[in-house]
Image (spheres, rainbow, N blue to C red):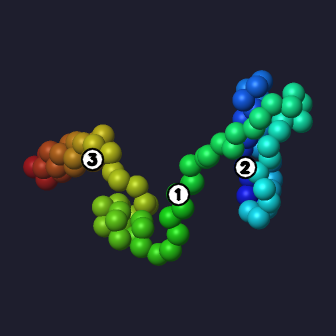
Amino acid sequence: MPTYGYECTLCNAEFEVWQRITEEPLQRHEGCGGALRRRVYPAGIVFKGPGFHVNDYGSKRNGNGSKPSSEDTSAKSDTKTEAKPAEAAAKS
């Protein structure tokens, strides 16, 4: 059953009620007797089915499912450059 929101025009009270779609909307607030106005809420977006993350983002990610940060790539390049001079010194 859908949840409908109502607002009282007299006391500005807001509340939600579970009602069937076929039921008539509420007319009067039980607390103060004021007229009720049905509130409209936006529908949530649900992405279902195959293809959303596989097609759109699958090729841009590394093996663990996240993009490498610029700090990670700079740290890796620094480590490689430091290792090469040490190897050259060991050979001489």
> Label 1: few (<14), some or many (≥20) within 10 Å?
few
Label of residue 73 in the image: 3
Residue in the picture at 79% in, 43% down: 27
Residue 33 lies in quadrant: top right
Write down the residue under mark 2: 4
Disc 2 vs disc 3: Cβ atoms closer than 8 Å?
Answer: no
- Kindly identify the residue that appears in the image at 84 percent across and 36 percent down: 29
Residue type at the position of mark 1:
Ile
SS at mark 2? strand
Earlier along the polypeptide chain: callout 2 or callout 3? 2
| Nearest to the observer: residue 63 or residue 16 | 16
Structural distance between the alpha carbons of marks 2 and 3: 51 Å
Q: Is residue 9 above or below residue 20?
A: above
Query: 11 or 17: which is nearer to us?
Result: 11
- The residue wearing badge 1 is 45
Residue at point 89%, 36% (across, down): 30
